[in-house]
Image (tube, rainbow, N blue to C red):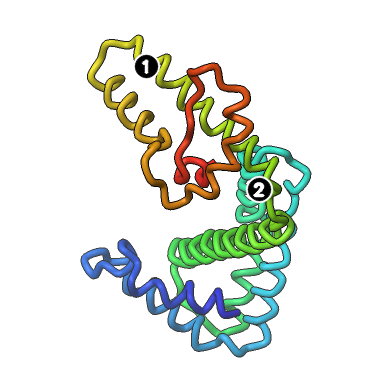
Amino acid sequence: MMYVGLILTSLKDHPIYSRKEFPNCLPLQNLGKQLSENADHPAFKNFWTETAMELWKIITSADKRVLSCQSYDVIFANFHNFRLGNIKKNWDNLLKELNITNIHELLSNILLQFCLRNLNRKIIKDRNIADLQENNDVNSTPLTPHDHQVINYISGFIPFALVKRFSKVKTTMAAKFVRVLKSWRLNNSNDEHESFVTYARDWVKKQNRGYLFQPNWDLHVFF
């Protein structure tokens, strides 16, 4: 219910629906205010609880998809079908039960779609945050020195290959890329993380025949 209340309240600060020069904006805000005043009504709570449950089913319907872009395709296709289905009839029944009458059909539908769209976004956002936290907890195992050596090797090979490629391109942009890439090389002078890079680059030294890129600390952390 907190989400719905925030969504309805956001109408007054919306970049479009808060503009007084648009004739439908004030009636739309008034409709949102009437709904907010009925937030404790059982019919209001039931409608949005059931709606949130349906949205959750839609959001989790793509859990078996491997790529996130495929997941969102499934989610938004199902969401589109849902918002054009029986939800409109249930919405009209809610307004009647709350004694909110004489509302233009267009305004009623605009507010419904506004609420559905924003509620769907908020649920997806919260779920992504929760999943990220869960993944961080799972992947919090400290890296071994060998892991760091492998990362050090890989993080040095990529800019090395890119420098080699862009050095052959005679353009201003390519020259800028080369300068940035070379700035990632380890400075053989004093490095504040010298004790770390000493053991992390041991494997790179063994493999190096004079050309491998020794990455600095910032690049290593980035990878």
Circles 1, 2 touching at the beta carbon (< 8 Å): no
Q: Quadrant of residue 139?
A: bottom right
Q: Quadrant of residue 33?
A: bottom left
User: Which of the pair 124/115 is nearer the observer?
Assistant: 124
Read off the residue under disc 1: 166
**Residue 157 in the image: above or below residue 6:** above
* Residue placed most toward the observer, 76 or 88: 76
Q: Residue at x 51, y 30 (%)?
A: 156
Q: Could you tell me which secondary element the residue under label 2 belongs to?
A: helix
Q: Using the image, tell me which numbered label, if any, was put on residue 75.
A: 2
Identify whether 110 is placed above or below 167: below
Give the percent coordinates (x, y) of residue 152: 57, 36
| Crowdedness near tag 1: few (<14), some (14–19) or many (≥20) residues, C-alpha within 10 Å | some
Q: Amino acid at mark 2?
A: Ile
Give x and y (percent) for residue 191.
41, 47
- Judged from the image, the secondary structure of the residue bearing numbered disc 1 is helix
Q: How many numbered marks appear?
A: 2
Measuring from the top left, give residue 40's x and y in whole percent: 60, 90
Q: Which residue lies at the image location 64% right of the left edge and 57% below the top edge?
A: 132
- In the rendered image, residue 31, in percent from the top left (x then y), is placed at 44, 77
Q: CA distance from mark 1 to mark 2?
A: 41 Å
Residue drawn at (43%, 77%) of the image: 9
Residue 55 in view of the camera: no
In the image, which is nearer the foreground, mark 1 or mark 2?
1
